[in-house]
Amino acid sequence: MEHEKRKERRCGLWGSQIGKLALLFCLSGPLSASTPPVAELPAPLIEAAARQNEELRTTLRWSFGGRRQKGWDLYVALIQQLIGSEAAPDSPAFALALARWQEEMGLPVTGRLEGKTWSAMVSTFQARRPGGQRRGASTDLVLAPPDDFFDRSRPLSLRFVDRRAYDAYQRMCQAAREALGEEALSSSGLKIVSAYRSPSYQAALRRRSPRAGRATLAVNSPHFTGRALDLFVGGDPVSTADWNRRRQVETPLYRWMALHAHQFGFVPYFYEPWHWEYRGEESPAHRLEPGEADTP
Ligand SMILES: [Zn+2]
């Protein structure tokens, strides 16, 4: 309702020459310090931003982990959580919520999810991860039962989880079950694919991986802490192929996780829909250092 009122006010502004000039200025390129506050953005500018977002979601060029990437379509649920709007990414409501986030972040207020904004989002996703805990393994590991695992025959040595992370995981599964129904968690939904890994086990994984040299598996994995969980959200459990990640992020289960896992202290590794890190309530935010942002 409030949105509607603001929209009307912006329409009024748009009717004037001032509004037309503002739009021309805004569409001419990245905005400077003279960017108008979100409340004064004319509706046509927001609508134009929405149309551009429709394109940018599949075309924006960026790179991550040494690989060229295209679009931010795979991260829509995480973006919606970040900007506090579940509106479709090609809608004016999404562009408006994005403009508010840009304003909060001190970015040019355009309502467009272009390179600079996307880069700020990636930094924000990464900064939320409990990187400071990577250095030390949990001293409070518990053994989870085989039933919690995607592969029930997983050896005992690979079934340990940090006690608090495990407790939070169980509460999260229960909440997902209540929200989405038992059906959503059947077929292995949210089963643990991988939990605690010892440094020696990780080293063996790296030796077996043909792409280990390209940081496919981190040397200093958050899985050493016992607080990182790979959870089954559909598709091939842990493949970063775009087609696979698309399948995963389109499941109701992943979407629910993207919007609610933080309530249980879990934060996503944005690039891998299955990888979640328990941060708890009191863990301070940690900004990853350069070189730390490799895949877990
Ligand atoms: Zn992982």
Image (cartoon, rainbow, N blue to C red):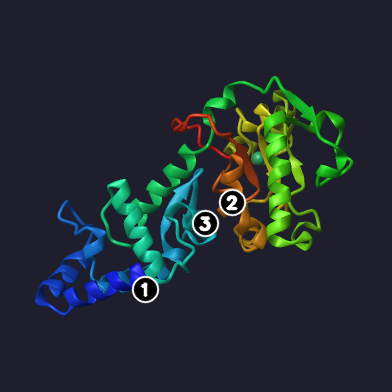
**In the rendered view of the protein, which quadrant contains the N terminus?**
bottom left
Please name the residue shown 65% across and 27% down the image.
225
Alpha-carbon span between mark 3 and mark 2: 15 Å
Marked residue nearer the N-terminal end (2 or 1):
1
Which numbered disc covers residue 260?
Answer: 2
Residue 186 image point, x, y percent: 81, 58
Residue placed furthest toward the left:
17
The residue beneath circle 3 is 75
The residue beneath circle 1 is 51
Name the side, left or right, on which 222 lies relative to 34. right
Marked residue nearer the N-terminal end (1 or 3):
1
Mark 3 packing: few (<14 Cα in 10 Å), some, or many (20+)?
some
139 is higher (above) or lower (below) than 62 = above
Can residue 113 be seen here? The reply is: no
Can residue 20 be seen here? The reply is: yes
Please name the residue shown 58% across and 45% down the image.
263
**Does the CB distance between marks 3 and 2 fall below 8 Å?**
no
Q: Tell which of 283 and 29 is nearer to you.
A: 283
Please name the residue shown 32% across and 53% down the image.
102
Numbered disc in front, either 3 or 2: 2
Please name the residue shown 23% across and 72% down the image.
9
The quarter holding residue 36 reads bottom left
278 is higher (above) or lower (below) than 119 = above
Which numbered disc covers residue 121?
Answer: none
229 is higher (above) or lower (below) than 47 = above
Q: Give the SS element for disc 2.
A: helix
| Quadrant where ligand 1 appears | top right
